[in-house]
Image (spheres, rainbow, N blue to C red):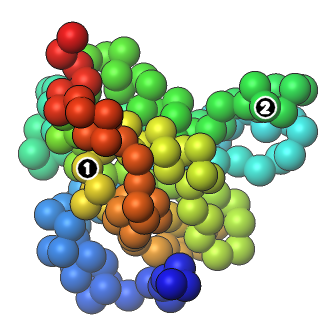
Amino acid sequence: MPTPSPSPITSSEAIDAVCTAHGLSVAEFHALRARATEAKTRAYCPYSNFRVGAALLARAGEGEGESGGRYVLGANVENASYPVTTCAERVALGTAVVEGLHSGNGRGFRAIAVSTDAEGPASPCGMCRQFIREFCELSMPILMFDKNDTFIVMTLGELLPLSFGPDNMGVKDPAKP
């Protein structure tokens, strides 16, 4: 089965439809975009010059999200030894876990946005998709923005079909021993 190739979205009507479909307010959508774009400015990428920023909306915490959830940011951090590089999505999720925002059952996060300087939205790499799967529901939206704020939204399940996660290991709540 071919992977879906959604068309980039720019209209306000489409933004409203995306928000309705994924349980986000328009304000949360715009905050995710703005924060991912801002996080991108903090990227450490002297080798590739490919900046990536991520903004994660957590359900928990005292934050600015309309649901009370906190926004957690991440940016890619490169290393001269490329395999040691850490992607923006993993930085954001790792920070959220350390800050106690992970519920353990994949229900701690509502959405993640990724912003790059690319022409056309770029999706999380395969390693990040699997990392996101560890902490998020397959129905969680991933908003992908390019340098012009054109975006694509896909769920984690669409980006990682036939995924392998904690439930495949018989673990219902990874936060509990």
Is residue 65 toward the left or the right of residue 15 in the image?
left
The mark nearer the N terminus, 1 or 2, is 2
Q: Compare residues 10 and 91 and report the one nearer the observer.
A: 91
Report which residue position mark 1 lands on. Answer: 137
Picture residue at 45% right of the left edge, 60% below the top: 160
Question: Are the residues at dot 1 and dot 2 in contact (C-beta closer than 8 Å)?
Answer: no
Q: Give the quadrant of the C terminus.
A: top left
**What's the amino acid at mark 1?**
Glu
Q: Give above or below for 109 relative to 117.
A: above
Picture residue at 60% right of the left edge, 52% below the top: 126
Residue 116: give x, y in percent of width and height. 64, 57
Circle 2 — which element? helix
Is residue 117 toward the left or the right of residue 32 in the image?
right
Where, by quadrant of the figure, is residue 132 drawn? top left
From this viewpoint, is residue 3 visible?
Answer: yes
**What's the amino acid at mark 2?**
Pro
Where, by quadrant of the figure, is residue 170 drawn? top left
- Residue 83: mark: 2
- Residue 10: mark: none
Measure the alpha-carbon separation of dots 1 and 2.
27 Å
